[in-house]
Image (cartoon, rainbow, N blue to C red):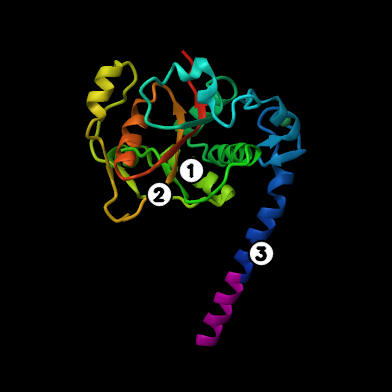
Amino acid sequence: MELDNKFGERFLVTLSKNIAKFLKTTQYSLSECELCKSHHLIHPLLCRHCYEDLPLFSYQHLHKNLLNWPAIDKLFPHRAFEQLLCLSPYVTPFDHWLKQLKYQQRFELADLFGFLLAQLWRNQKLGNDDSALLSVPIHIKKWQQRGFNQAHLIAKAFAKRSHLPYLDHAIIRSSYCESQVGQSGKQRRKNLKNAFQLSKTINKWPSHIILVDDVITTGTTTNTICKLLKKKGVKHITVLTVALTLP
Ligand SMILES: [Zn+2]
């Protein structure tokens, strides 16, 4: 009887391994481009042609930093971060994709964002020396309601592809506030003042932190976290987001 159980167990393990292998090899052939339905894919959701058509920021004269663009520099006058890298302005298809990830739980889009951010990271020849990733957290109550944090999913997908270490529990959101949409900058700053806490388990912070979020708008949330990190001796902070909301 015991022999039978062992045989059954081994059979199930082999079967599930083969199913996983099959799914992996057919993933690309079964899926189609989100935008044009083509099967010539560079990612399970995107083809080469549509990738080249995406409204991505050009970094050609910006020295690896969107803040070197005067119009964007003006948006974040009191920032506590040194570098800003975003894929695109908050326009189609990114606005649509970000909403689908957040409100329709299309988690495969987090993988697409991770893929696109890793392309940007590679194209700009950015290094990994004493660098680590963080993502902007949401409060545990919101996490329980929604079931996930989209910034965490994007950071995880980016970490996998960029081989950067991800400190996924290094920062927590300790106070709960309702959606900040429609609140003034002053009110937001007041709400955020004591909203975040850094983990006490990290003795030595890396000199370079890459802070990942889905969208950057006023930068108030981002700045609050950056100030805490600077107090811990972090020298250089890169804010890395999928989209940037332009006024
Ligand atoms: Zn396409």
Which residue is found at the position 72% from the left and 28% from the top? 52
Give the residue at mark 3: 18
Which residue is found at the position 44% from the left and 42% from the top? 152
Badge 1 or badge 2: first in the primary sequence: 1
- Location of residue 79 in the rendering, given as x and y in whole percent from the top left corner: 38, 26
Badge 2 or badge 3: first in the primary sequence: 3
Q: Is residue 168 left or right of residue 128?
A: left
**Residues at circles 1 and 2 in contact by the CB criterion of under 8 Å:** yes
- Location of residue 141 in the rendering, given as x and y in whole percent from the top left corner: 28, 39
Under mark 3, the amino acid is Asn
Prevalent SS, magenta region: helix
Q: Give the range drawn in magenta.
A: 1-13
Which numbered dot is residue 168? 2
Which residue is found at the position 52% from the left and 40% from the top? 107
Q: In which quarter of the image is residue 192?
A: top left
Give the residue at mark 1: 155
**Camera-side residue of 169 and 74:** 74
**How far apart, in angstroms, are the residues tagged by discs 2 and 3?**
31 Å
**How far apart, in angstroms, are the residues tagged by discs 1 and 2?**
9 Å
